[in-house]
Amino acid sequence: MSDRGMGKDRRSHLSSSSPGLTRGSTFAAREEDVDGRVEPGHDGRTKGLVLRVVACFVAIVMVATGAFAAWVVSLGPLPLDKAQQVSTTVIDRNGKLLRAYAMADGRWRLPVDAKTSVDPTYLKLLFAYEDKRFYEHYGIDPLALSRAAFQLLTSGHIVSGGSTITMQLARLIEPRHQRSVYAKLRQMVRAVELERQLSKDQILDLYLALAPFGGNLEGIRAASIAYFGKEPKRLSLAEAALLVTLPQSPERRRLDRYPDAAHAARDRVLERMVEDGVVKDDAAQATATAVPKMRKQIPILAPHSSDQAIATMKDAPIIKLTLDATLQRNLEALARDRAIAQGPDVSVAIVVVDNETGDVLARVGSADYFDERRAGQVDMTRAVRSPGSTLKPFIYGLAFEDGFVHPDSLIEDRPIRFGTYAPENFDMTFQGTVPIRKALQLSLNVPAIALLDRVGASRLSSRLKQAGTSLVLPKDEAPGLAMGLGGVGITLQDLAQLYSGLARLGATKPLREIMQENDGRDTMRLMDQAAAWQVGNVLLGTPPPENGVHNRIAFKTGTSYGYRDAWSVGFDGRITIGVWVGRPDGAPVPGLVGRTAAAPILFDAFARTGKIPAALPKPPRGVLVASNTKLPPPLRRFRPLGELVRSGNDQAPHIQFPLNGSRIDVDQSEDGRNAALPVKVAGGVLPLTVLVNGVSAGDIDSRRQRLIEPPGPGFARLTVIDATGAADTVVIRVQ
């Protein structure tokens, strides 16, 4: 058989034995060579190749993924704690910046809240220029990266980085000076981490606090304050565009070095915003606006209060004070101007207190914090100085409380001696017989010392300390009559607290300067309500200086021995203001008098609050308001303690009931009214007058007893005065 026939038979055999195979498929499945070996078909080779490629690819991906994961782990945690460190800032009661302190390395980095402290126009430009899809992506914007890659391929160099705000924040947290693929990849990884750990608002706030603006300025707040002199809460379009472009190249566009470069960059931002339809009509005007060329000083308001707050609230990034920034600024300017008028060595201190809360609204510790000649960094509101006559109102207040004088009682202003002490008036003259009211308004020395002799210097001292005041006496000396004329040390802030107690009708409240919730400050007793109101009513009639208005401000002046300190403290129904003028070193200033040096500043300070003086409280119920002739006989004329002793009145009045320190339980009748309280007295010259908390409760008849309406629950002072002015007092507790 020929070879051809054999081949034919072989094909026929294959076809018949494998009915499922066609002729073409027979050769697709396999092919025998002349030696009888079988070779794989094309499909087998392709499948094996694909499997090998896939296996290699999977292996590469797994290795790459593992390496990438190991690399990510090697990066460690984000240093957020360090990035979130900011300059310590002190703000006022309304959130306005008073003072900021640079960080340890000299950088200014102020905390930012984009929602409340940044102009919406700036945010709109920032998102449109830097990151249009900020609130949509998860740290990486694929569209922006694709655009950046296309620009790189077509231009041959980097046109835009494609970085999101989150990626820029990552670069700020971990600075890289070189632009590379590795650095970009690291930013992307860190951006994703940031998005997982922080909210979008937190990321934006942190970026706005860290973004560089040239020199040692970081963050939009520091830049806005340094370049525009204001917070970024209200920015013009030109200002907003400038702040958007500066972080792109902060050193090459520094306004204090390269203002032209900054101007050109700002205009490019505006041009692009016009092209994108973000800005329309205002762009031309913004482009024509010049850019600042000098940095402004970061605000230093209330430096003494800020220093004290920093020492008290250590490590607190933001400290909120009770001060009012506007009032503080006005009074600092006032103190500076008045000190210049007084001379190069004289300083001025001012403190303002809210009567109702005890909050310090302004504190000017010196005329100029940076003036070494005036010892500007010494806080004279906290310095202990001689108060001159400014304690006299409290002597009169205790005398009113004890009930042996009334504002319209008569008193002698004549030469008198108390042992070896013979007080004299400031002008070395005497007024003769004057009403108590006039004696206080004219600040006469002899009547004040006579009343203090009757009240008791130790009692005055203890009452002032009870009201929260720290008095400083000379070493090894007890309180004496000289303290009524300034023979004791006190601070301006303590004086202001005492005078605010008069405005509060006899209750002082500790001053507060750092805002804290539930600070637990309790009121302290200064004197009875009636007595405090009477003192305020008398001081309201004190003749004001030339720049003052009558009967609007209750005030008192004082001058210390040797013309070293000039004082003026006053109050209306809303605030109390204290003023001190003098040399911080304590040297005399010839001609320095409270009425001419301090009182005009006091009235100017009230004027600079921007509010009309508020009316004083109305008189408490039962306060005796009468002329001298209609007063009870014992109250018509004051009799000094020595005169009472010389009168030979051995039968001074003595309250037999109730006893001093006793507790009185008051019963109620069926109609709900309190039962009358009996007062029994022995001795004394008729007529006898009884006072309850300084308010007259009527006369006691020959039976030497009287039923009075009991005061409300709490402590009450009962005083009985006879016709000679002799008196006895008890303190009881009614419940």
Image: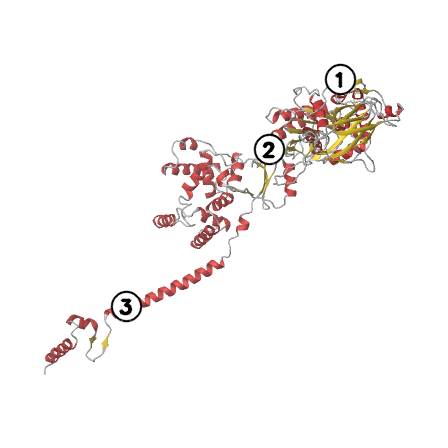
In the rendered image, is residue 535 in sight? Answer: yes
- Distance from the alpha carbon under mark 2 to that under mark 3: 82 Å
- Distance from the alpha carbon under mark 3 to that under mark 1: 125 Å
Residue type at tag 2: Asp
In the rendered image, is residue 348 in sight? Answer: no
Q: Which of marks 2 and 3 is nearer the N terminus?
A: 3
Q: In this view, does 182 lie above or below 562?
A: below
In the rendered image, residue 362, in percent from the top left (x then y), is placed at 63, 32
Pick the front one: 478 or 425: 478
Quadrant (top left/top right/bottom left/bottom right) for the C terminus: top right
Q: Do the residues labelled 1 and 2 touch (CB within 8 Å)?
A: no
Which residue in the protein does label 3 denote?
Answer: 47
Q: In this view, does 540 lie to the left or right of 431?
A: left
Which residue in the protein does label 2 denote?
Answer: 324
Residue type at tag 1: Lys
In the rendered image, residue 686, in percent from the top left (x then y), is placed at 83, 22
Q: What element carries label 1?
A: helix
Q: Residues within 10 Å of mark 2 (few under 14, many from 20)?
A: many
Q: Which residue lies furthest to the bottom in this view?
A: 1
Q: Which of marks 3 and 1 is nearer the N terminus?
A: 3
Q: Earlier in the sequence, mark 1 or mark 2?
A: 2
